[in-house]
Image: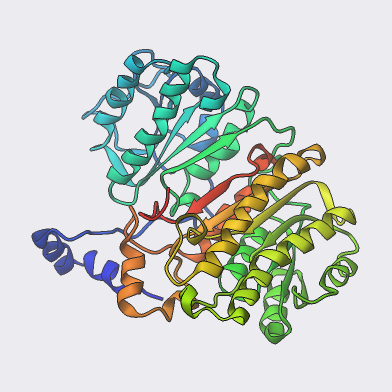
Amino acid sequence: MSDRYIDFANSFLGQRLVSAVGLASPVRLERWQAGRLRPVEGPLLLGGGPLVGQVNHFASKLTDAVFSYGPEPLVATLWIPGQGPTLKAVVFDASHLLHTDQLKQLREFFQPLLRNLQHSAHLVILGRAPETLSDPFAASAQRALEGFSRSLAKELRNGSTLQLLYVAEGAEDQLEGALRFFLSPKSAFISGQVLRLTPCATHVTDWTRPLAGRKALVTGAARGIGAAIAETLARDGAEVTLLDVPQTKNDLEALAARLGGRSITLDICAQDAAPQLIEQLPDGVDIVVHNAGITRDKTLANMTPEFWDAVLAVNLNAPQVLTKALLDSGTLHDDGRVIVLASISGIAGNRGQTNYAASKAGLIGLAQAWAPLLSERGININAVAPGFIETQMTAHIPFVLREAGRRMSSLGQGGLAQDVAEAVAWLSQPGSGAISGQALRVCGQSLLGA
């Protein structure tokens, strides 16, 4: 549904009034559009330590305008504060900052940029995971990057975002895939996140159709976020199978026909759901997206056993049972991808949602526990945790609560189903095996949780 406050705040009269009374003025975020050719449409600035040299090898594939800034510039075209162009994307390698005294380079690099960013600019800081460093001072300096990056992300304006990527030794060749996502509008509603890249043998061979030849299963796919995920996976080349409850059969079949895919109507909580599903996937799958979920909200004092059991059964038990069955039967292929749809409620908690938050936190725990066990087969599993997303469900939230949900993030607005779908599509790519057992929040850097 339309966000009327954003519409007003970006009108001529609204801009003047909002500025006069000091209200927040969220902007319309730039999102990926069909026909776009490059991840970055504008100047890309590189700076910092040795990892940015790796980025420089493929920077010309991201944009046609690459600049360098810092005491030891890596590329010939230098960016001069106040004289160079405004910036659409920035990558700073902080992996060489190994002592407290060196952290001042963060201020020295970023401070001149902050008034020279374009609308919806995307910034990424690179580092080394603190737990991999033997020197306590070095580990401390690298851990400091998290506090810096999360705080700076909250200071950015005009729809800009910032992420921190810890890059393990041997994972440098996975940077292109990560930066193609985080420097592009595909990550429009993601900010202040910290992820770890680890070595991965697989790579994307065609960036225009990164999922070509892959078979994907999406549960809860008839409408809303599930439908958006199916559409985005199909856009990226996947052959999609859509699953939902029998009551959604007409919508499900119509969407599957439009996407050139297949539909399965199935109650995922049924006793025989697993063998039924395996039977309908004779060629197996490469990507499994557990999107199906329900809410039955009540404070714990008023929570009925039926409400509790239904939410845990659909949201947590069914993904566990079905994934194990797909793994044990070999239906989920080696080098596969499993993505579970969690929620920031599972991270920060939410009043009246003890059942829902427990189920979503359980999914994050499932991803963390299963990741090392599946690595031998090249399978990765991750959680995507949406925040406030504009859907039919949130449209029915009372006005005051809906407005609070929209504004309680650094980006000052709700996300779209497309934002969640883009994150799922990226985690489904071959090269995204570099990430496993992690939770990626798609929440505009919500003020709830970390």
Picture quarter with the N terminus: bottom left
Q: Residue at x 61, y 68 (%)?
A: 226
Residue 39 in view of the camera: no
User: Residue 184: x percent and y percent?
Assistant: 48, 46
Please, which residue is most extreme toward the left here?
20
- Image quadrant in which you'd find residue 287: bottom right
Q: How is the image coloured?
A: rainbow
Compared with 97, 430 (above or below) is below
User: Residue 84: x percent and y percent?
Assistant: 27, 29
Please, which residue is most extreme toward the front here?
301
Compared with 83, 63 (above or below) is below
- Image quadrant in which you'd find residue 320: bottom right
Q: Nearer the viewer, residue 243 or 180?
A: 243
Q: Nearer the viewer, residue 446 or 52?
A: 446
Q: Residue at x 56, y 28 (%)?
A: 167
Horizontal side of 289 relative to 346 (left or right) equals right
Residue 115 in view of the camera: yes
Compared with 105, 126 (above or below) is below
Count of numbered tags = 0
Q: Residue at x 75, y 73 (%)?
A: 268
Horizontal side of 145 relative to 53 (left or right) equals left
Horizontal side of 343 relative to 118 (left or right) equals right
Q: Residue at x 61, y 49 (%)?
A: 426
Q: Nearer the viewer, residue 56 or 307?
A: 307
Horizontal side of 191 relative to 430 (left or right) equals left
User: Residue 381: x percent and y percent?
Assistant: 68, 48
User: Residue 392: x percent and y percent?
Assistant: 49, 78
